[in-house]
Amino acid sequence: MAETAAPYRCGHVAIVGRPSVGKSTLVNALVGGKISITSRKPQTTRYRILGIATTQRAQVAYVDTPGFQTRHRSPLNDRLNRAVRESLAGVDVVVLVLDAARIVEADRAVVRLLPGRVPAIAALNKVDLVRDKAALLPRLAEVAALFAFAAIVPVSAERETQLRELQGEIEERLPLSPPLYPAADLTDRDERFLAAELVREKIFRLLGDEVPYATTVAIDSFKEEGALRRVHATVFVDKASQRAILLGEGGARMKAIATQARQDMERLFGGKVFLEVFVRVKHGWAASEASLQRFGY
């Protein structure tokens, strides 16, 4: 007798957590492609990004969000926190990402945002960095005491450990529905947006602690000429001194940033990229409502 195909499931899943717990790395691993930028610095993600994973049994639209933080208040951070709250509305499942090394008050602040009407799953990330695996048992108990989670799954997004288990827990709780997005799509963002994010990622990775947070990237033009993409971008900084740091001696640092960003674009877009990057000073852009709206925050 022929087997009956399992009913198809599809839905939206918000990935939330405090800064630096590995949310974007997890989304990239679950989607199977780089759609969110990553760095070791907290608050690298500034935008709500949809990552789409399609299989024969389910389609999951993962909503990557900025790290929710309460330490530093500013118009920009207020907008990022609002993006987190808004991402929790209208989703079918929430995945709270926690660091396996420790649970802190910032995690509890995110727990307080979790809606009670949808299932929440705790992903205890970076278990590969915990040397004493016996320490995971009390950590799991600590997580269980935080909230009535539908499931708690220890994972390593970096090493892709136990991601199938996490995917199974997520898919099981999605509503019955046909796919909402084309099967070939990995994200709802266009190449223009991804190009700007790759430039910003290299700034976060190649510079020190202060300057990356004072920068934002705008794409002035993005043209496709056959298999070639011509991209002109501007990096905005808050101060002239930050512009000097970003450029480096003889423009060497900016050249390294642009080269690495171009190489990532070519891998992601599957073709040659001509990238030109300028650096301009725009005082107080992160505190200006008009500027924040212009840059899409």
Image: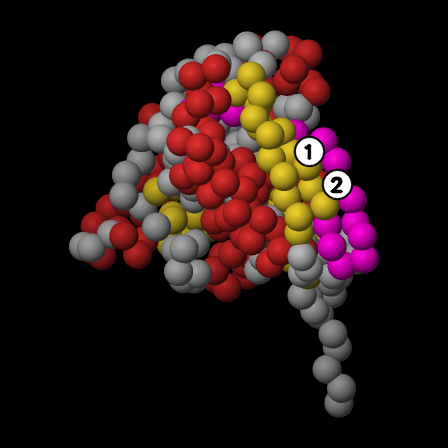
Is residue 192 in view? yes
Question: At numbered mark 1, what does the secondary structure look like: helix, strand or loop?
Answer: strand
Q: State the quadrant of the N terminus.
A: bottom right
User: In the figure, 288 relative to 146: above or below?
Assistant: above
Q: Nearer the viewer, residue 74 or 283?
A: 283
Magenta stretch prevailing secondary structure: strand
Residue at the spot of label 1: 219
Residue hosting label 2 = 222
Instruction: Inspect the image, locate mark 2, and give the three-letter code of the amino acid beneath it.
Output: Phe
Please give the label number shown on residue 239. Answer: none
Residue range corresponding to the magenta coloring? 211-229
Q: What residue is rendered at 74% in x and 55% in y?
A: 228
Q: Residue at x 47, y 43 (%)?
A: 256
Q: Is residue 173 above or below residue 48?
A: below
Q: Is residue 179 left or right of residue 58?
A: right
Amino acid type shown at disc 1? Ile
Identify the residue shown where x is 55% and y is 10%.
Answer: 283
Secondary structure beneath dot 2 equals strand
x, y (%) of residue 224? Answer: 79, 49
